[in-house]
Amino acid sequence: MNTIALIGAQWGDEGKGKYIDILASSADYVVRATGGSNAGHTVVRGDKAYKLHLIPSGILYPDTVNIIGNGVVLDPQMVLAEMDELAAMGVKFDNLLIDLRAHIVLPYHKEFDELAEIAKGVNAIGTTKRGIGPCYADKCDRIGIRLVDLLDENTFAQKLKQNLQLKNKIITAVYGGKPLDYDEIYTEYCGYAKRLQPFARDTGALLYDAVKADKRVVFEGAQGTLLDLDSGTYPFVTSSHPITGGFCAGAGVGPTAIKECLGIAKSYTTRVGAGPFPTELDDEVGNHLRDVGHEYGVTTGRARRCGWLDTVILRLAVRINGLTALAINKLDPLTGLKTIKVAVGYELNGKILKDFPADISILERCTPIYEEFEGWTEDITACRRFEDLPKAAQRYVLAIEKLVDCPVTMIGVGPDKEQNIVR
Ligand code: IMP
């Protein structure tokens, strides 16, 4: 079997785009299965930077089939705008397929995302305001509108009417907002339906055949393990399952269809949005990592919170994703730091925690237990073999491998696809 899943091992923004691009270059199929337009990464080709949110990264390879699976929440306006932007850069969409079961993000989902965040006040999650949570909530409530529904004008009209009646009551009576107009949404979305029609398919069946035929399938992760609805820092999480298991439900494949699982972690930790972050650095080291690592979101432009690497998190990622290998990305921003710290456990009231706790109030109160490593000053961005790295950098990577019990097979030393060491 020739299949690989690529997963964010931290809170997202691990630089997965670069590794997806590396894997996509030899893929027959690239599949997105979770999340929506809350995701974002940039793929650089020569002097062109392609910004991707919903479209799978294999789109830049004309022979690769790109699938948006049933587990994705699809914002038609966003995906079509993204396609228009990419088309203007010469990208073709002959090989794009969108699953009929994918749920559609509607204007009331985005409205609810905004209003619910405001209502939460100091407890706001810091969402991307893309309507992700409300769309998944409707899916679970079994009132969602799927692509297959959108493509049938009568079904769409009936479902939209029914939903909007309820949503408008909540918007006006609960949140004191303005009701949304049925005709406006109906007309706008019927226009989107016409444009999306050619891409709509039952992609699960197609993927089954692809796996059977030993095609190279890359499952492209979005967000990261700690944002998982079940295993992450709930409630400061996203509303999907950005873990290996999420690919099964979200792409309609069985677990045995995924042979390898590559986790991507940065050599330090970042997070956007609210929620506990034990190794966060509110000092000049944190500022250094943000500046040198360009830690600002592709989707929202928000500055990311930065901190030391946390192996408690990575052990969780290895465990729940069944990682077979780990890529340590962005080793280069650590260059120049005299000492580098790594959290190996947490301490709370004299007790040592080795595993990631279920209760986030523990995370807020615990103190990380750090191991310290000697830094390096040499520029590592031109290193292409492990042996080329300064000895201190080699020791750092080997220590991570041991602490998380997973082989580190790739190391990123710069933003370009070529700035990567394979072990
Ligand atoms: P939502 O996914 O927009 O509902 O946001 C929920 C949480 O997930 C917030 O803390 C977001 O900042 C975070 N989040 C969602 N997508 C991403 C991502 O692609 N990278 C990093 N954080 C994300």
Image (spheres, helix red, strand yellow):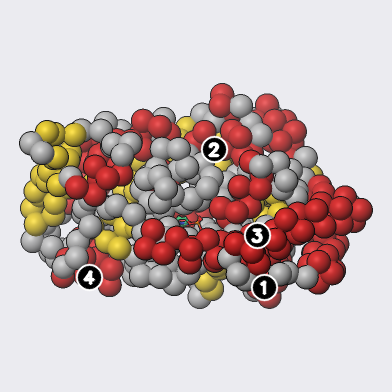
Residue 287 image label: 4
Q: CA distance from mark 1 to mark 3?
A: 10 Å
Query: Which mark is drawn over residue 246?
Result: 2
Image side of residue 1 versus residue 388, left or right: right
> Which residue carries the number 3 mark?
170
- Numbered label attached to residue 213: none
- Residue at 70% across, 41% down: 142
Q: Position of residue 402 (x, y in %)?
A: 21, 34
CA separation in Å, label 3 and label 4:
42 Å
Which of the two discs, 2 and 3, labels the residue nearer the N terminus?
3
Q: Foreground: 256 or 391? A: 256
Graded by Cα atoms within 10 Å as few (under 14), some (14 to 19) or many (20 or more), the crowding at tag 4 reads some
Give the number of marks: 4
Tell me the residue that label 1 is attached to: 178
Q: Quadrant of the N terminus?
A: top right
Q: Upstream in the sequence, badge 4 or badge 1?
A: 1
* Quadrant of the snapshot with the C terminus: top left
Q: Amino acid at mark 3?
A: Ile
Which is nearer the N-term, disc 1 or disc 3? 3
Q: Nearer the viewer, residue 173 or 141?
A: 173
